[in-house]
Amino acid sequence: LTSPFSLTIALLCCGNGTPRMLSGKRFVRTFRFLFSPAKSKLKQALKQKNKASLKFNFYVIMPVPSADFKKALKQLTEKEKEALVLRLVRKDAEAYDTLAFELLEDVTLESLKERSQETIHDIFFAVSGRSLSKALSRGLKKVAQEITRYQRITKDRQGEVDLHIYALALIFENFTGQFESLYKGFYVATARLTLRTIMLIRKHLHEDLHLEYQDSLNTFLTDLNGRSKRRQLTFNLPLQFELD
């Protein structure tokens, strides 16, 4: 057994390597086939008490419209296309938001970003439970999902970074007391979010924009690096956000 053990689930079935979606019984058979050898490897790893070596990677292959699909779509009348689109957006809120962003003048980057900010704010201040730190960790996952949804709809990388900064600002203004909780999950998740924000800035934003985020990020990093849990991090958190 190699380390890490990677299990890849690919929803494709074609001799020529062209991916296509599986459905029904065929999907079930493929799923079982992919998992059957993994089951024995998993048992072998557990016997060796090498649980840390296990790593599962799941890849979801998105459908690619075929030539026949595109041809059939072109043959639809305008009325049929309208009915099809309306049927789709009634079942998929994200599809509705995407089309609204593309079609409606009053649905802008700014309005969608403001709505995501409101959602992020509501997520943080609606957390509850016996352990506030654990509740905030769960909330942070929802926040990350909301930011990802915004980016999928708008393809706006700077807006994605702005939402990360907004979420971090809420944390550092209101919830840093939970960094000292016995439960380290919230501190670690916040550190990861900070590091991801830095990586997004370096990867997607022009260098001229980096200065705009430096002060905020350095404030966050100073707080995180000054905590006792800093040495429990399994990844490298920079001391400062340095400009290139």
Image (spheres, rainbow, N blue to C red):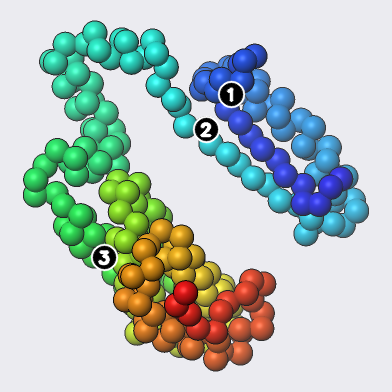
Nearer-N-terminus badge (1/3)? 1
Which mark, residue 117? 3
Left or right, residue 192 beside residue 94: right
Q: Residue at x 64, y 45 (%)?
A: 57
* Quadrant housing residue 66: top left
- Give percent across and percent down for residue 76: 21, 11
Q: Is residue 171 visible?
A: no
- Give percent across and percent down for residue 27: 58, 22
Q: CA distance from mark 1 to mark 3?
A: 38 Å
Left or right, residue 47 beside residue 119: right
Nearer-N-terminus badge (1/2)? 1
* Quadrant housing residue 129: bottom left
Left or right, residue 165 beside residue 135: left
- Give percent across and percent down for residue 22: 54, 21
Mark 1, secondary structure of its residue: loop
Mark 2, secondary structure of its residue: loop
Kind of residue sitting beneath label 1: Leu
Which mark, residue 12? 1
